[in-house]
Image (cartoon, helix red, strand yellow):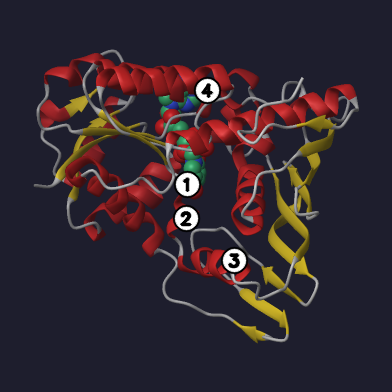
Amino acid sequence: GSVGYAIVGLGDYALNQMMPRFSRSARSHIAALVSGNPEKLRRVGDAYGVPADARYSYEQYDRIAADPRIDAVYIVLPSGLHADYAVRAFKAGKHVLCEKPMALNSADCERMIAAGQRANRRLMIAYRVHFEPHNIEAMALMRRGAAGNIRFLRTEQLSRTDPASRPAENWRIDRALAGGGPLEDYGIYGLQAALYLADEMPESVAATTYRPANDPRFTQVFASVASQLRFPSGAIAQLMTSYDSNGSNLVHVRGDTGALIMDPATGYSGHKMRLEGRERRDIALGDPTVQFARQLDNFTDAIRDGATIRTPDEMGLRDVRLFEAIYAAAETGKTVPLRPDGRMRL
Ligand code: NAD
């Protein structure tokens, strides 16, 4: 049968991107809602036909244990809350689809994984890009050497945050909810792209962070983070991310015989991709917005049929370990050697 999801957190991404896409996933449906705003619960519950007794406040969250209509929770809360809500969902016997970043430190990620194993429930990190046709094709192209041997990867995930005019962004500049800021939120796409296009793990990382003085947006989080990863093959990745820059969402791979340019690379839609070199061409594929439903399909198949999760908890943990290495490199000013699982080699 269809998998019933409880949506935990009715913010921008849940309301405007994921929830409208449930109807495109054949065996996934919205079974319950969890929100702190009673008016929103009523309005959104009515719009999606969620029964009144399947609308929960955060205080009532643990009661989902007694609700058999809920198979899985989808956690779309500020990132610093992911770990606690995931662990409580496992205690309630539910499967967990968790938004990126998995958590803000590797200890929390490990706590989530252990709780899922104890409960014998599945855990997936919502890296939708792994279900997006352009990015899937980019992985295949780079694996078969369409640009030759990869020498450089350059990623830019840049935006200009303005909580004064958009109060919903306040949690994104709060360290307890957002960690270091732009890297965990947006730079994660550049880090992910570097890893799935290079198709290997970095062996070392160097990094720089920047926080301007006297800017109220950046008393707790960084304005910009730049890092450099070195891969065993010799490929080098330059990752740039910022909350204080003109916008950009670029992924650029340069090999010894060609190049791949994705610009924009990882958004909800509107992808553009071009190969240079021997195979020079523009690459336009099907509708990028299938990524939302296909991600749900994968988790539903994992829950119902034991399918392999394409973006599993270990991947979320790996990325959070790399954040820790990037910040350690920036703090010490030293290149940090890495183990194959992303942990720092100390
Ligand atoms: P948002 O601010 O629009 O929504 C967050 C929701 O959490 C709000 O409804 C807010 O009321 C609620 N909330 C509950 N407790 C809160 C607290 N203590 N402080 C602040 N808010 C609280 O944010 P969003 O953009 O929807 O992001 C939510 C999550 O989804 C984040 O983890 C983010 O990284 C992730 N996200 C993923 C994508 C993607 O493409 N996969 C895109 C955007 C956001």
Which residue is labeled 4 in the image?
A: 80
Residue at point 30% right, 55% down?
Answer: 21
Asked if the residue at label 1 sits under 8 Å from ligand 1, the reply is yes
Secondary structure beneath dot 4 equals helix
Q: Is residue 167 visible?
A: no
Amino acid type, callout 3 = Arg
**Up/down of 236 relative to 228, above or below:** below
Alpha carbon distance from label 4 to label 2: 23 Å
Q: Are marks 2 and 1 in contact (CB under 8 Å)?
A: yes
- Which label sits on residue 143? 3
Amino acid type, callout 4 = Gly
Q: Are marks 2 and 3 in contact (CB under 8 Å)?
A: no
Mark 1 vs 3, N-terminal side = 1
Alpha carbon distance from label 1 to label 3: 20 Å
Residue at point 19% right, 46% down?
Answer: 305
Which residue is labeled 2 in the image?
A: 130
Alpha carbon distance from label 2 to label 1: 6 Å
Tell me the mark number nearer the camera, choosing from 4 and 2: 2
Q: Is the residue marked by circle 1 packed among few (<14), some (14-19), or many (20+) residues within 10 Å? A: many
